[in-house]
Image (cartoon, coloured by chain):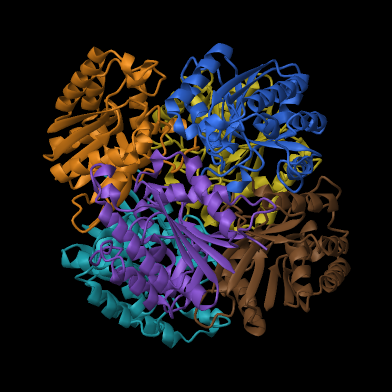
Chain colours: A blue, B yellow, C orange, D cyan, E brown, F purple
């Protein structure tokens, strides 16, 4: 099975579905990761002021995480960080369409559409548009993941709500997820921030209790064609 | 794989997922069908006045449909037709729990919870309660089906809305579904009634167009544990 | 009665409410059609590369469809296809306000706001803003139509959901709708694509079964002042 | 046009749509009113302890209100006040079905389904079931009204939300509504209670401001077949 | 401040808001607890077969938990366990009304209305009805709590969704909550069951990360009058 | 307590929470007001054509209203009126972040996110992003207010719905609200427009009847950390 993970920023892919990626690759599936945005430049007053060395370094971290998770390949794009709304939606859609056409994955994991972060919202819509289920569409299944510090910080104000219906047991790969996350030490924060190792652990345990497992990542299956 | 279909009335199982049952049995899975209500007695002023011969006959039709679909076994209960609200919910739950315990299916198909028909609503809640995902719960996946003439006749007034996310190609089994439905000629109506053969065809074609296939049954996956 | 149909792209007006337009004009009402976008240019990498002859041709098709439906007049605008998000919303609103002021229709039909297509979403919001029910507002009723291949392809991810509450019998005008649609043979696809003649037929029959008629177009009435 | 108002308790018909009834009868339509419950007996510890003289008196008030509104006829039933949940839903449905069969109205006004009051909820479901749009169904339009002191006291906890989309100008009949309400002086409370004359006035003015009129009753059109 | 906690079963009060109760009592507020149902009898085939000694024992556990939390008083009722739907809703409302009248609390904590458990659903509706905000209503604020193993097991199928908007820091009282929970060792299960000590810990930490605290209980404020 | 009101246009702060601001300042709290947009320039065909004297005058009116309400300070920004969608969201967020950092308020009042007006929608999202509840976030409570002529004119088409759960008694300050509103006589319209004095009165009385008070402003509490 060929699986494509489409995320907005380096580290979203680990936060959202790192344990599941590791499990899929262990089970022999081909997983590809695409990151549409350059990351971190929004921390500067103006995008042009961003330290390009740091952008490069972040890409290196991302590559290392990809390797740890066992993914086949990583595709890095340079949409402006936290400024996806300044790009015509059609341009984002065309990036995703081209990717889908090239890789022809059966399964896609991407952002939830009700996140607080505007880049996540735009990626979600672009992915749904690029995977319209016409006859020759390779993508049969689409899953939305949560990103701690963005999904829960919507406080029910941005539709759709996150309605997880697929629960993946990651008891055996949560360690790999933790390791992959530690590649991003510039993005990680101290507990109780949702992007801390302890928070990631509490979240996976909480989801675990929902379905009788030790550690779980939760997804909303948007559609499956069988 | 062991699959259990839990419906309120004879014919709901065919209307809701007849094509999918036929496909599952053709693919070698074990499908069991449980009908919790006796059917038709609500057409009489009082339940006691119902013609028991007709109730028996309806059960015979149900058995024949079961056979046509290739299901392994049929379990008939006698909850009062369109009067499930006169039975304590706990009693309905216990029926389902006992069934689950006996058959230990991995997958359950049942009614959507926002239907107009009160029996459907109650079966939905009973099934969700009886399949609480504790550690030893055999049921890993639950799907809700629509029943034409009940799901769409809620007109968005009864939550939850029907949000189909799983689309099963029944192009090769729609004929079997049609045949199984014809067992119930007392329940079938003339087009444009939703329980007419032409309606069933239009519905499966409409769902087909949603995902690029000729004929489809649509389901809402309520949860999947993997 | 004066009716204005406001759509994003040539063919949306037929797909969304062609049968209803034909019925209204047959019953003696004045129907006007406005298409805010130029259509098709999004199929090119850059808008400027689009073949202007094809844009013109599409406008011709639209005029022919308008005639077939019996509408009084057609108003063509040139917002950039699938790039309405690059235009300030206020500019779209002002176009609609000017139209409303000129035609002073009592009834408006327009896009549903939860469509996958971003242009539809923007037209919806612009129409609602331009028809704010102040004392001198001519528009008393607003209806949202679905556009097959956009409304259903949201898969419940973009609010609001399509909640049809008005069902118009088009049994006698579905042939005209089919003919009008055939004007757009560049936009039409093969079944099971939702923009195929067979799909349009299946959809109208499916809606028909919902309310006991042979063929129906479904709308969500957004508001009516009486 | 023949219109049937179906309410749970005496005074709900006035609170919910008294101004609209008066306007409809003034415009020459036939309006019938049905009250399914006996009213007030829930104020006693046990239903049997209720003062039957007061029940009778309340029915007299209801008749007087009916007359003031210009309705053609009043149908009084005796479901137990605030205890409709102790009656099988099917029995309530059969009452409504029999009424619909007898009067064959084109239009029905009834309770909103998300009210706090359980009797309102049950009437709503019974009416939707009894008016299933099969081919020979006389009812083409169904409207839900709000009842001050029940609809707003759900505080968004009971679905569906009240989503008014039809706004009826009652500027010329609000006086009749006020008079009809005063028939029920045992049910009326002092401002700021929602069932006070001042509250009724504030509510109709608030709805008026929503659509640019002086006084309005708001409804949710559940479905219209045309 | 006088606070009343209204729950369906012994242990719901601890699971739902044990940490908050402990904090409120430490801060000098008067907290009262009411348990409307007898608990555990649903585990027997018939309610009459239940071992009354165990029911009594459970009440003893509840009293001990109440003491540990520092609550002022405990009110135990005997509605039939998991069979609240066999009691007329009005009777449940009258119990709550009488309690409110006697204690005149300003704040009420109770069940969320979208839980899987039917008793929780009924308590929720009864509390909202009994606290209708008429002029002389003492209750100014109502909060809904989640009960692990019931709220999350609705899987978005029962409205309303749980939309927490109030987050109470229980870092200093989570130990008391744990102790109070251990009174109910017959109700507690092994991790990863949601009613295990480890689950309670993971849940409070997960909510903590949502708002930057170590341990939190989450509530939905239904209404506040100020 | 330090409170910050963040609104899009001059007069929104009064329409949305003028009575509450007056009550808070009377009770000794520090209230600050920030207006992110310049106001009125959208009434011109092009923004550059706007009469700058009128913009200045409007700012003067705003200052006078601020004074009347007893607020401590007013912060005026110049985002383009009704064209906030032409500004990168990140820039709006940074304005709010800087304000929060400077004033460090515990409480924020801002626009509801489902308003018809696009500027309101954008302010809402910017505020939620700028107040992400990390450990050092000063803002503990966020409230959304309605703006008559924008919130109700969404007609349930733009999520989220306005779900008020906090009702503030403004019986004693409604006169101050009226006076503050009269500063904006260029923005005020004749009844039944929602921005007329009579409408403001009807609205506050309607909300009052919801909770047993004479005059009330309604808010949706988005989150509270305690």
Asked if residue D132 can be seen in this view, the reply is yes
Residue D202 placed where, x, y %?
A: 33, 73
- Left or right of C9: which side holds A212? right
Q: Residue at x 52, y 81 (%)?
A: D43
Residue nearer the viewer, E189 or E137 = E137
Quadrant for the C terminus of chain E, please: bottom right
Task: From this view, report whether residue C9 is shown above or below residue D98.
Answer: above
Asked if residue C214 can be seen in this view, the reply is no
- Left or right of A51: which side holds E64? right
Residue nearer the viewer, E82 or E159 = E159
Residue F199 placed where, x, y %?
A: 31, 68
Task: From this view, report whether residue B71 is shown above or below residue C134.
Answer: above
Quadrant for the N terminus of chain E, please: bottom right
Task: From this view, report whether residue A159 is shown above or below residue F20.
Answer: above
Residue A170 placed where, x, y %?
A: 77, 32
Quadrant location of residue C76?
A: top left
Q: Which residue is drawn at 79% across and 57% down?
A: E43
- Left or right of F31: which side holds D208? left
């Amino acid at each position: 099975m060929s699986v494509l993970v489409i995320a907005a920023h380096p580290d979203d892919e680990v936060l959202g579905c790192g344990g599941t990626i590791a499990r899929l690759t262990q089970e022999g599936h081909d997983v590809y990761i695409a990151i549409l945005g350059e990351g971190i430049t929004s921390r500067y007053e103006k995008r042009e002021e961003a330290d390009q060395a740091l952008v490069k370094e972040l890409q290196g971290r991302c590559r290392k995480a990809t390797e740890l998770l066992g993914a086949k390949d990583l595709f890095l794009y340079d949409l402006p960080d936290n400024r996806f709304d300044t790009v015509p939606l059609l341009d984002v859609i065309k990036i995703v369409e081209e990717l889908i056409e090239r890789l022809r994955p059966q399964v896609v994991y991407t952002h939830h559409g009700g996140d607080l972060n505007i880049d996540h919202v735009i990626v979600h819509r672009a992915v749904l548009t690029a995977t319209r289920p016409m006859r020759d569409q390779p993508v049969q299944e689409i899953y939305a993941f949560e990103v701690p510090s963005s999904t829960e910080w919507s406080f029910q104000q941005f539709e759709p709500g996150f309605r997880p219906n697929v629960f993946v047991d990651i008891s055996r790969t949560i360690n790999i997820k933790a390791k992959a996350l530690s590649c991003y030490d510039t993005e990680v924060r101290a507990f109780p921030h949702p992007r801390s190792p302890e928070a990631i652990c509490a979240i996976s345990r909480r989801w675990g209790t929902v379905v009788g497992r030790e550690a779980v990542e939760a997804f909303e299956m948007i559609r499956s064609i069988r």
